[in-house]
Image (spheres, rainbow, N blue to C red):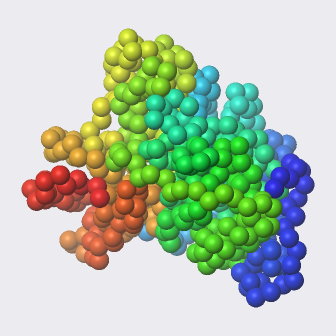
């Protein structure tokens, strides 16, 4: 179902029925049932850009309307960042305006994780000129800046858009970045390259007011890699590469995955989608979500709740009957990935005989100066193509064999090793209390120091391992699917004081045996105890492991 760029959403009109209480448009319920829905009805989030460019950027932070500041700015990738110095104990107590700093976090969407070095240089320049050098790689392949001033946004957009990048719908109740295999189009083992589908979806959907008022955010993943390298199981919609016995390569369709406080693994609809049909099916699913998604309560508005209530069969039926107006072919399930590491770190041969090199910043933290040097290295050794990954890592593509060593040495000189320890390779962290208004604890610096400490204490540990660190009960760093997931909260230390710490989740996984980590009752550690605790867990594993047993399940 395709709709023109400026046409407002036209959901099927039904008589208000028993689903009216969930605020579904498809049940005829268009009256906003909470303040977020009212804000979206009052004005489309996309319209705030004009106000930023014509008013707020000239008159400054204090001129910004409250509903724009804490609502519609997100449609252009902007969140106010946390005022420095407010401890995690105050997060739930203070009013939003008391937590707001006058600076912004700005997210640049990098669909499919694809960047040219020309784009990377602009990303680096903006970091250096407007973001005090900050530039984090997120768990969804985006780049996130901090310390952005509203006055600088017109110039930042001008520079990004001049090289084909954007912040459009990078946040908000919108079609968010489409994550994609970072080795799309180059991997020797690829089933199908999803890049054309990502580009077509971007063309149809980004900035399209038919899809700019969704019940909540909408996350998508497309990967034709047999390594299943985009965490498709926890996306709202996912297209996973499969080989159909009669129809050839294409995608298996998943819906309803997501983490946060009600984690769910996505479900297969049992449908096979050829590459050329992916954009139509994406539009169908997002249209269905817009119309049937629950808008009454924000904590029940993600598509996973609708999928859980309907089940795969009804979801597929409504998708086919009302949105695609045709049947989808049945298809096989994807084969289980053979590798536990699905992050592309290290030196790998491409199908054209050249190499790609995956390297590991600590917990996704880089900076403008480093990004500019990565661009230099990519140009000197490859063809100028760079990728970001959903594990907060990066790749340089298209390196001739005789240039590989020079590149890995150049990266190592930037402290970006292509042979990281399992701790650096497998640790991710969300933004945390440094900048996030919802945070209770520190994450990035804690994760980086944890990596260094574990490398020092356990130099012989070589097992694949994931340690994911969140600063609050949300799951921006996917704690539920890590071997060791750490959910930030205040905990009581030995002296009875409330201090920063973590609730521990153990044994989460995607891929071979997907499932959520177990929250071990009472298992909470203070931040200060964290290295000791993880060292104890890993030493116990080393001492008690059975033949062939890996730490990850
Ligand atoms: Fe912020 Fe919580 Fe998300 Fe971390 S998990 S970035 S603290 S909302």
Q: Position of residue 305 (x, y in %)?
A: 60, 73
Looking at the image, which is closer to me, 432 or 262?
262
Residue 295, given in percent of the width and then of the height, sits at: 72, 74
Give how far across and how far down residue 322 sits, in percent. Answer: 80, 67
Q: Is residue 286 visible?
A: no
Residue 156: image x %, image y %?
Answer: 69, 34
Position of the N terminus, as image quadrant, is bottom right
Left or right: 530, with 122 as reference point: left
Identify which residue, 291 or 82, lies in the foreground: 291
Residue at 74% from the left image edge and 55% from the top image edge: 283
Which residue, as the protein is rendered here, is positioned at the far left?
543
Choose top left, top right, bottom left or bottom right for residue 413. top left
Q: Is residue 15 left or right of residue 34?
A: right
Q: Nearer the viewer, residue 225 or 372?
A: 225
Identified at 60% across, 75% down, the residue is 311
Q: Looking at the image, which residue sits at the far front?
A: 246
Q: Residue at x 52, y 40 (%)?
A: 191
Relative placement, left or right, of 218 versus 547 is right
């Amino acid at each position: 179902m395709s709709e023109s760029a400026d046409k407002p959403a036209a959901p099927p009109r039904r008589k208000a029925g028993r689903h009216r209480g969930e605020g579904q448009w498809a049940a005829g319920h268009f009256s906003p049932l909470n303040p977020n829905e009212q804000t979206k009805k009052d004005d489309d989030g996309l319209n705030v850009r004009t106000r930023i460019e014509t008013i707020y950027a000239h008159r400054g932070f204090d001129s910004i309307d409250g509903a724009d500041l804490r609502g519609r700015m997100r449609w252009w990738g902007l969140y106010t960042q946390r005022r420095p110095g407010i401890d995690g104990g105050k997060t739930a107590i203070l009013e939003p305006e008391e937590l707001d700093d006058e600076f912004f976090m700005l997210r640049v969407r990098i669909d499919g994780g694809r960047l040219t070095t020309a784009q990377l240089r602009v990303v680096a320049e903006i970091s250096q000129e407007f973001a005090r050098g900050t530039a984090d790689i997120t768990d969804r392949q985006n780049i996130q800046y901090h310390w952005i001033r509203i006055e600088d946004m017109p110039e930042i957009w001008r520079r990004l858009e001049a090289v084909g990048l954007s912040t459009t719908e990078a946040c908000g109740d919108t079609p968010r970045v489409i994550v994609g295999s970072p080795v799309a189009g180059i991997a020797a083992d690829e089933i199908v390259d999803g890049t054309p589908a990502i580009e077509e979806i971007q063309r149809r959907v980004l900035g399209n007011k038919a899809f700019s008022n969704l019940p909540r955010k909408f996350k998508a993943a497309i990967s034709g890699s047999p390594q299943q390298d985009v965490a498709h199981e926890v996306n709202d919609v996912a297209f996973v590469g499969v080989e159909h016995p009669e129809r050839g390569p294409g995608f298996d369709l998943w819906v309803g995955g997501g983490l946060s406080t009600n984690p769910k693994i996505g479900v297969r609809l049992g449908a096979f989608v050829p590459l050329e049909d992916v954009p139509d099916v994406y539009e169908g699913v997002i249209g269905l979500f817009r119309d049937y998604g629950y808008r009454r309560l924000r904590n029940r508005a993600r598509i996973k709740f609708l999928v859980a209530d309907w089940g795969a069969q009804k979801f597929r039926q409504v998708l086919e009957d009302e949105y695609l107006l045709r049947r989808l072919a049945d298809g096989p399930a994807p084969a289980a990935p053979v590798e536990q590491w699905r992050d592309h770190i290290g030196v790998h041969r491409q199908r054209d005989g050249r190499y790609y090199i995956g390297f590991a910043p600590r917990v996704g933290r880089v900076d403008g100066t480093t990004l500019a040097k990565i661009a230099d290295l990519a140009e000197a050794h490859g063809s100028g193509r760079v990728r970001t990954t959903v594990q907060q890592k990066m790749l340089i593509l298209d390196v001739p064999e005789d240039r590989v060593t020079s590149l890995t040495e150049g990266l190592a000189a930037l402290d970006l090793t292509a042979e990281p320890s399992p701790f650096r390779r497998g640790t991710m962290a969300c933004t945390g209390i440094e900048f996030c208004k919802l945070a209770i604890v520190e994450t990035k610096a804690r994760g980086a120091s944890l990596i260094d400490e574990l490398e020092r204490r356990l130099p012989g540990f070589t097992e694949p391992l994931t340690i994911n660190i969140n600063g609050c009960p949300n799951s921006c760093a996917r704690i539920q699917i890590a071997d060791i997931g750490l959910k930030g909260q205040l905990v009581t230390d030995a002296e009875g004081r409330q201090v920063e710490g973590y609730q521990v989740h153990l044994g989460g996984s995607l891929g071979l045996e997907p499932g959520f980590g177990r929250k071990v009752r009472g298992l909470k550690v203070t931040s200060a105890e964290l290295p000791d605790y993880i060292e104890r867990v890993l030493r116990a594993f080393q001492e008690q492991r059975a033949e062939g047993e890996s730490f990850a399940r």
